[in-house]
Amino acid sequence: MAKSYNITQVEAAHRKRTMVSALLIFLAMPLTIFVGLQFGKSKFMVVSIILLIYTMLPFFMVFEKRKPKAREIVLIAMMSALTVALQLFCHITLPLQIGTAMVIISGISLGPEAGFLIGAVARFVCNFYMGQGPWLPWQMFCWGILGFLAGLAFNKVDLDELKSRHFKVMMGPALCVIFGILVAYVCYQLWPGNDDTFFGWRLYVFGFFGLLAGVLLQRKRLPVDGITLSVFTFFTVFVLYGGIMNICAMVTAAGAPGAEISIERMRALYISGVPYDFYHASTAALCVFLFGNSIIKKLERIKIKYGIYK
């Protein structure tokens, strides 16, 4: 009976953290970014620090009613630093978005709260070297939400299955996104409106709802195999990171000559953003396919050896 009680308490605490994380990510953070814009673009650093505080709250709820162990904090710091170092290395050498891949890997291995924290902190530090600006809070939010969703979608890691390269689950986020894009194409054929091409906002909007439906359907059920990881990475980066940062480009450029906020400009940005978003998503998926299994396997061994997050 005591064992059952403890499991129930742990599950209740986990659900509580997930609910708090979801409220902060989907309500508090977008609202904070919007309010920060009202005070001018020069306040981006203040907004970024507030976002960092938001990201820490769910993570520290892991240590509710118990003292945090140094090994747990060190692992988070190590993954954040490794994400920054790899992203900066590829930024000046190889044209790969390995930092995005590392955030998704961290979310899968350490959970959604830690994944969001690593993504937001790593992006905050990266921009001290790659350039600060009003886009910083948006990038922190994007990297963080990638880690959060990866932690929600994938199940516990089975070390014996990590070397697999097959797509096990057909009814997952990937197929939901594909179905959403097919619906978008049908809608474009029936009601094209003022759009001259299908490639634009429909890819992101319909893809987002497909991704959201897929994550909810397959929550904690996706297997950690190479192809599933890669397909999930590609669609989440393209739909979420690309979709949000295209809005960021319009908002942060507002006020410049010919850069007003309008539906027409948003359509143009989404059309012009497809090539870069495809490159970003493809290279991140490639990094996950090549290195994801080995990194996740080592993180799982560290967690088992030192009893982290148990």
Image (cartoon, rainbow, N blue to C red):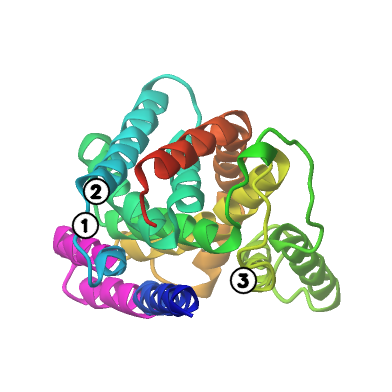
Mark 1, residue position: 68
Q: Report x, y in % for residue 50.
A: 19, 67
Q: Earlier in the sequence, mark 1 or mark 2?
A: 1
Q: Which residues are magenta?
A: 27-56
Of circles 2 and 3, the one toward us is 2
* Magenta segment, prevailing SS (helix, strand or loop): helix
Which of pointers 1 and 2 indicates the residue nearer the eye?
1
- Between the C-alphas of marks 2 and 3, the distance is 30 Å
Q: What's under tag 3, amino acid-wise?
A: Leu
Q: Is residue 299 above or below residue 113?
A: above
- Residue 38 or residue 91, whichever sits in front: 91
In the picture of the structure, the residue carrying the numbered disc 3 is 212
Side (left or right) of 50 relative to 59: left
Mark 1 or mark 3: whose residue is earlier in sequence: 1
Looking at the picture, how far across and down is residue 293, in whole percent? 59, 35
**Mark 2 highlights which residue?**
73
Residue flagged by tag 2: what amino acid is it? Ile
Q: Residues within 10 Å of mark 3 (few under 14, many from 20)?
A: some
Note whether residue 71 is visible.
yes
Q: Is residue 232 above or below residue 171?
A: above
* Residue located at (78% from left, 61% from top): 175
Is 39 covered by the magenta stretch? yes
Q: Secondary structure at mark 2?
A: helix
Q: Residues within 10 Å of mark 2 (few under 14, many from 20)?
A: few
Q: Pointer 1 and pointer 2: residues touching (CB < 8 Å)? A: yes
Would residue 243 be visible to someone looking at this image?
Answer: no
